[in-house]
Image: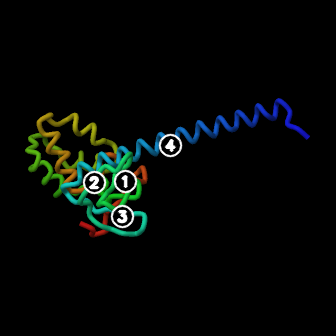
Amino acid sequence: MGLNKDKLEELSISRDDNSIKLSEERKVERENKDLLLKDLTERLIYHVVLSFNDGEIEPIYSIRENGLNYMINDAYYVEEAKPYLFPLSSMTEEQLNELKTYADLKYELNTLELVEWKDGYKTLEFWLEEIPSYCVIKVFDWLNKNHFDYRGLIDKGLAIDATGLNIY
């Protein structure tokens, strides 16, 4: 009993659909890996704490290229690590004031705007458009130093929400 032409076409289309899905999944995996690598390299000097697939928890102290991959702490691949980060929505008024002082912000971000930011009405991109360009680098430095997730890694499942964990 052989396969008829319609059945062969159906199987071919099904295989092609699965190939497209796999290709899209691999593309997303690669983009996520690149995003995580970019984030970790910027946080390297601040020793962000990482959770690894084998249950180990330790601060990052090195990233090195290993062929086509990158190794963290000479023991783990990038995709095996998840940093502990704080969502922007967890930023307190005290932290916001510290950020403003550190970045030498003259722009007044008041409590109402902080509440709107926490509730998701304003994004970091919106806020960054409101401040002078000479302050932007300092803002990112402070966010990295204080382990805030401004790239959405927590929402993508690439980082762990550190709120209330007393990890830093």
Q: Give the residue drawn at x 31%, y 63%.
A: 163
Q: CA distance from mark 1 to mark 3?
A: 11 Å
Q: Earlier in the sequence, mark 1 or mark 2?
A: 2
Residue 44, above or below 122: below
Q: Earlier in the sequence, mark 2 or mark 3?
A: 3
Q: Which quadrant would residue 135 be assigned to in this image? A: top left
Residue furthest front as drawn: 67
Q: Which residue is mark 4?
A: 26
Q: Give the residue drawn at x 26%, y 60%.
A: 60
Q: What number is the disc on residue 119?
A: none
Q: Relative to the observer, which residue lies in front, 139 or 2? A: 2
Pointers 1 and 2 in contact (C-beta within 8 Å): yes
Q: Earlier in the sequence, mark 1 or mark 3?
A: 3
Q: Quadrant of the C terminus?
A: bottom left
Q: Quadrant of the N terminus?
A: top right
For label 3, the SS is: strand
Q: Give the residue drawn at x 38%, y 49%.
A: 69
Pointers 3 and 4 in contact (C-beta within 8 Å): no
For label 1, the SS is: helix
Q: Which residue is mark 3?
A: 51
Name the side, left or right, on which 32 lies relative to 26.
left
Give x and y (percent) for residue 17. 64, 36
Q: Earlier in the sequence, mark 4 or mark 2?
A: 4
Q: CA distance from mark 3 to mark 4?
A: 23 Å
Mark 3 burial class by Cα count in 10 Å: few <14, some 14-19, many 20+: some
Pointers 1 and 3 in contact (C-beta within 8 Å): no
